[in-house]
Image (cartoon, rainbow, N blue to C red):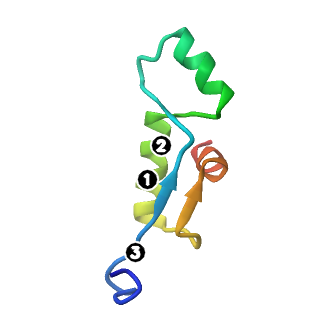
Amino acid sequence: MADDNPSRLEVFILRPSGILPVGAGPVERMTGKLYGAVWVDKLAKVMVDLLFEGQKDRIIENNAILRLAS
């Protein structure tokens, strides 16, 4: 649908390696660091930024999410 309607619809696919909730405990935070998990509030910020600003890449991998979140 996005390819057929580029002026009306833009699609982004975010691929975080994991999502940490706001109330994550010490064990969740430690294991999240092992695989580069993204905090849910930072992921939400990236999603809102994409809504307003867009991005050239349609698929946004974990490294790009972390970079955009900072």
Looking at the image, the residue that sits furthest to the top is 26
Q: Which numbered dot is residue 47?
A: 1
Q: Position of residue 24 (x, y in %)?
A: 46, 17
Residue 11 vs residue 69, the one in the foreground: 11
Q: Quadrant for the N terminus, please.
A: bottom left
Vertical relation: 51 (above or below) 1 = above
Counting residues from the start of the chain, the first of labels 2 and 3 encountered is 3
Residue 68 vs residue 29, the one in the foreground: 29
- Contact, CB < 8 Å: mark 1 with mark 2? yes
- The residue under label 2 is which amino acid type? Leu
Check disc 2 and report the residue beneath it.
43
Q: CA distance from mark 1 to mark 2?
A: 6 Å
Residue in view at x 42 percent, y 26 percent: 21
Q: Which numbered dot is residue 65?
A: none
Q: Report whether 60 appears left or right of 44.
A: right
Q: Position of residue 9 (x, y in %)?
A: 34, 78
Counting residues from the start of the chain, the first of labels 3 and 1 encountered is 3
Check disc 3 and report the residue beneath it.
10
- The residue under label 3 is which amino acid type? Glu
